[in-house]
Amino acid sequence: MKSLSAKDRRERLKRAPEIAPKTLATLAKQHPTAHCELDHRSAFELIVAVVLSAQTTDVAVNKVTPKLYERFPDARALAAVEPKEVEPYVASLGFFRMKSKALVGLARAIVDKHGGEVPRSMDELVELPGVGRKTANVVLGVMWNEPDGVVVDTHVMRISQRLGWTKNTDAEKIERDLCAILPREEWDHASHVLIFHGRRVCFARKPNCEGCSVSDVCPAAFDAEHVGRKAAANGDGRRKAAANGDGRRKAANGAKAGALRKAAGPRAAKAGSHAKKRSPRATRG
Ligand code: SF4
């Protein structure tokens, strides 16, 4: 399919924020089962899964959580052990030592400050070690449909840029833009729909615009690879844009690892530089 003329693209970009709720509804029809793909049965299991999902895929996390949840069914059980006891359960994931420490630290804070129950407010959640706005919004949105914003991960970031819903590259600014154009009751649903779309249709490289339900309104349709995509192996005139996209991803992943290290304590922070060198696979699918 031929890419859009510059004039068409400008017009689509101009209209994009205004029609965002309708565009989201169309995407939701394409992905009617969009939901959080981290397996969980409680807020505790969900917050554990979100912490484990840093720098890995939901599929990898879902492979380890059944046995982890069975051995540590609640915050008290996890708070009562040393991180070493948790390590074997998460050993197949990257940064598993840091993640084990982070989980135990998180569970102890939940027990000490909240009687073993995951708190239900943004302020209380972000006070927990290793929990930032993104993790808190996943928990608030998925468990109680009360998010305080839109979860912005790499898929939400890329697709929001392609759809013309934001010009920003910083996650917090993108979140503000999305909150301004989408109705509050859609904030949680929107992130699941965009993540589903990013995993199944609007890929970072080679987005499937032919198979996309919003290609008639998307400003990046049929020419999206340079918008928010990963750096390509073969350079072209758009290499700079691609490199910027990759840089943002690296920064985001670095921040995630930083949060984990912070939650896991000073020794983990020291070890972080080595772990960074050893971890070329820093993606979340
Ligand atoms: S798949 Fe193509 S048309 Fe659809 S949102 Fe992504 S870039 Fe736009």
Image: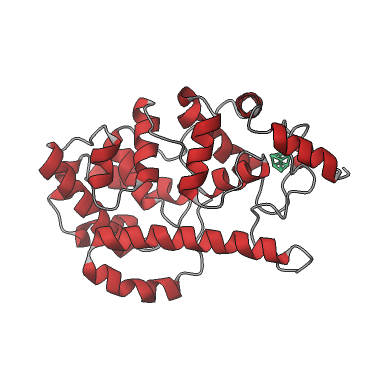
Q: Quadrant of ligand 1?
A: top right
Q: Is residue 145 left or right of residue 283?
A: left
> Does 168 sit above or below residue 25?
below
Residue 207 in view: yes
In the image, 48 versus 252, the foreground residue is: 252
Left or right of 141 on screen, residue 86:
left
Q: Position of residue 140 (x, y in %)?
A: 35, 33
Pinpoint residue 230: horizontal percent, then vertical percent: 64, 59
Q: How is the image coloured?
A: secondary structure
Above or below, 75 relative to 284: above
Q: Nearer the viewer, residue 240 or 260?
A: 240
In the rendered structure, the answer to whether residue 69 lies left or right of residue 93 reads left
The reply to whether residue 34 is in sight is no
Q: Quadrant of residue 195?
A: top right
Whether residue 106 is situated above or below residue 74 in the rendered picture = below
**Residue 8 percent across, percent down from the top left:** 83, 38
Residue 148 image-quadrant placement: top left
Q: Position of residue 98 (x, y in %)?
A: 30, 62
